[in-house]
Image (cartoon, helix red, strand yellow):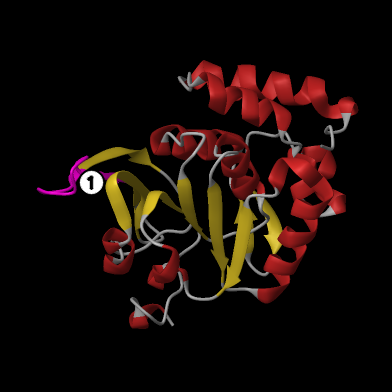
Amino acid sequence: MIVPAPDTRRKRRRMVSSQLVARGINAPRVLATMAWVPREWFLPPHLCDEAYDDAPLPIGSGQTISQPYVVALMTEHLAPRRTDRILEIGTGSGYQTAILARLANGGQVFTIERLPDLLIEAEERFRRLGGGLTNIQTRLGDGAAGWPEEAPFDGIVVTAAAPRVPEPLVAQLAPGGRLVIPVGDLTAQELVILERPPHGQGQLQQRQAGGVRFVPLISRHAFSEDR
């Protein structure tokens, strides 16, 4: 297993303390994982010095890597267990994927990206991190359609904002599973958490976790008006 660069370890710990714990993130495994994964490895080289800023950063192709707090917030609400099977919609830089893969290191993470260049770069980063991230499967495609042949999933996280929750993703959620997704448009978005009852019967429980701001989810499958 590759150990992340020690020269940024102090920055990571400071980020966890000042940006995450100070804002109410308290899941020990989430905090430890975010202190381990080197965010600079998931950024263009010219932005590495800004890796631990409290801000989203551009990663090319009109996409961004979310600020650390938002990654931690979504991960904490997803509450991944070690043996979970997790679906991520929007691989992007691969940073959120790496966090999930470390947390579900006895399970599997399936991640879908629609932009080929971003997916190729993310796959290279996963290889660079080595033995800690061997439980990731990638796919190029329309995330709103999910990954039906690998369903059901214990957790689904969407890293782009949808005007509504895609029905295929709801259908692929396992009993007791959680779906974390930003819902809204470019002017207003809310982080929504849907949870299926443990026995798979009954209405999904829904709650909201505050305002967020993500790039839009582009999907021919579910949102033809967004093309």
- Residue 163 showing in the rendered view: yes
Location of residue 59 (image quadrant): bottom right
**Above or below, comparing residue 121 to residue 20 in the picture:** below
Q: Quadrant of the C terminus?
A: bottom left
Q: Residue furthest left?
A: 202
Percent from the top left, x then y, of residue 140?
59, 74
Is label 1 in a helix, a strand or a loop? loop
> From the viewer's perspective, is 73 left or right of 139?
left
Along the line of sight, which residue is nearer the eye, 213 or 187? 213
* Relative image position of residue 52 (x, y in whole percent): 72, 33
Left/right placement of residue 178 relative to residue 108 reads left
Q: Residue at x 73, y 26 (%)?
A: 12
Name above or below for residue 4 compared with residue 58.
above
Residue, x 46% and y 34% (percent of image)?
Answer: 81
Which one is in front, 20 or 153? 153
Q: Residue at x 72, y 29 (%)?
A: 36
Is the stretch drawn in magenta largely helix, strand or loop?
loop
Q: In the figure, is residue 74 to the left or right of 2? A: left
Q: Residue at x 42, y 34 (%)?
A: 79
Residue 203 forms part of the magenta stretch: yes
Q: Is residue 42 magenta?
A: no
| Bounds of the magenta segment | 192-205
Residue 67, x across and y down, in percent:
60, 40
**Mark 1, other Cα within 10 Å: few <14 / some 14–19 / many ≥20:** many
Q: Quadrant of residue 15?
A: top right
Q: Position of residue 31 (x, y in %)?
A: 58, 23
Name the residue carrying label 1: 196
The vertical placement of 36 against 159, above or below, is above
